[in-house]
């Protein structure tokens, strides 16, 4: 497949290139574009044959629902029904931005888009390039992350190009994503809002706005047999080629444990990588990737680090554990899935 590439400067948008890519979307083709969370692989959400091409490009199971991206809040009324006051409050206060809401779908949303569910996941992104493309296309855009299914989500233009060139009709290269983790997914179909996927808009922020908010029980354990109501809830996700392990415990114990395992791996001919917070990098002997000094930086750098570890030919990755508060909840959700829930106590 010949992929049409558009390089667009976020500070000086070339609207002729936007029109080229939007036309592809209107024609039922697939286009990758940047968002504030990660790069998305988009197609017309209302066109079943177009949506099928997303699943084909990603190698994605068809019962995994897709997030529908819109340009204006008012479009929600065309796509969903039973819109609660809490849903309206989220849209008013947090859109455009990195939060997806789940509502009961209208018939206009194909079951191929909703993953066979009677609900639909909707988001209004804030990224200026994403918004320009959606507006010009004139249709809602279904878009999961722009990667082969199960792999880490791409946050950098170069990684998108390397993995997806030739698999889609168009790619918009527009710099790095801001947040680095996919959007928070909030189920608003029940009495109490339920977080199905944590993200940069945290449980604490949502509770200030809505009152009680719960975390879906499946976030704390591996459940491959459940019906996926949101992306990332089912199947293998965020995984590099290397085996990933999370090491938990006191800092000094974690460092000792990791260094012992690095030595053992070296004797076996295995190349080891370590992902850690900035202040701890001096304690490790292997190939170390510094994820940053704050949880926000860790979130922004996590997927890029996993991809870079693969490019370095790393066989085993050890990651420090992070606090499960604020955005740390989202970081640990992605790490646990990447590691297949393998945690070693130090």
Image: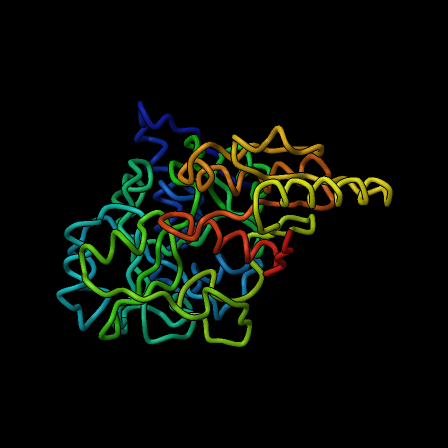
* Closer to us: 336 or 128: 336
Q: How many marks?
A: 0
Q: Is residue 312 visible?
A: yes
Q: Is residue 194 above or below residue 299?
A: below
Percent x, y of residue 143: 40, 53
* Closer to us: 110 or 148: 148
Q: Residue at x 60, y 45 (%)?
A: 319
Q: Residue at x 71, y 32 (%)?
A: 285
Q: Is residue 48 above or below residue 238?
A: below
Q: Residue at x 40, y 65 (%)?
A: 230
Q: Residue at x 27, y 46 (%)?
A: 97
Seen in the image, is 175 located left or right of residue 71?
Answer: right
Q: Is residue 18 above or below residue 117?
A: above
Percent x, y of residue 197: 40, 59
* Closer to us: 313 or 263: 263
Name the image colouring.
rainbow
Residue furthest to the top: 12
* Closer to us: 5 or 274: 274
Q: Is residue 13 above or below residue 63?
A: above
Seen in the image, is 88 located left or right of residue 161?
Answer: left
Percent x, y of residue 157: 49, 34
Q: Quadrant of residue 22?
A: top left
Percent x, y of residue 332: 49, 52
Q: Is residue 139 visible?
A: no
Q: Quadrant of residue 119?
A: bottom left
């Amino acid at each position: 497949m010949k992929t049409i590439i558009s390089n667009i400067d976020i500070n000086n948008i070339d609207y002729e290139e936007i029109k080229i890519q939007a036309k592809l979307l209107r024609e039922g083709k697939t286009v990758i574009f940047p968002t504030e969370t990660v790069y998305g692989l988009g197609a017309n959400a209302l066109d079943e044959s177009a949506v099928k091409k997303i699943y084909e490009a990603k190698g994605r199971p068809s019962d995994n629902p897709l997030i529908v991206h819109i340009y204006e809040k008012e479009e929600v009324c065309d796509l969903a029904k039973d819109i609660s006051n809490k849903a309206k409050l989220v849209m008013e206060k947090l859109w455009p931005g990195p939060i997806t809401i789940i509502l009961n779908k209208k018939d206009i949303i194909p079951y191929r888009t909703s993953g066979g569910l009677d609900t639909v996941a909707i988001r209004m992104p804030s990224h200026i390039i994403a918004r320009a493309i959606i507006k010009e296309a004139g249709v809602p855009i279904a878009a999961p992350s722009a990667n082969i299914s199960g792999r880490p989500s791409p946050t950098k233009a170069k990684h998108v190009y390397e993995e997806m060139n030739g698999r889609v009709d168009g790619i918009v290269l527009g710099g790095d994503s801001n947040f680095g983790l996919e959007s928070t997914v909030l189920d608003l179909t029940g009495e109490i809002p339920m977080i199905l996927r944590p993200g940069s808009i945290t449980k604490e922020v949502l509770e200030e706005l809505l009152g009680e908010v719960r975390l879906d029980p499946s976030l704390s354990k591996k459940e491959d047999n459940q019906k996926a109501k949101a992306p990332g809830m089912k199947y293998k996700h965020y995984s590099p080629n290397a085996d990933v392990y999370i090491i938990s415990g006191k800092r000094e114990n974690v460092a000792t444990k990791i260094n012992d395992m690095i030595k053992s791996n070296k004797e076996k001919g295995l190349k080891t990588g370590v992902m850690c917070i900035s202040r701890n990098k001096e304690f490790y002997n292997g190939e170390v990737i510094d994820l940053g000094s704050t949880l926000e930086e860790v979130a922004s750098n996590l997927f890029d680090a996993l991809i870079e570890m693969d490019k370095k030919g790393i066989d085993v990755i050890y990651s420090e554990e992070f606090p499960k508060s604020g955005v740390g909840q989202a970081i640990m959700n992605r790490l646990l899935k990447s590691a297949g829930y393998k945690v070693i106590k130090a």
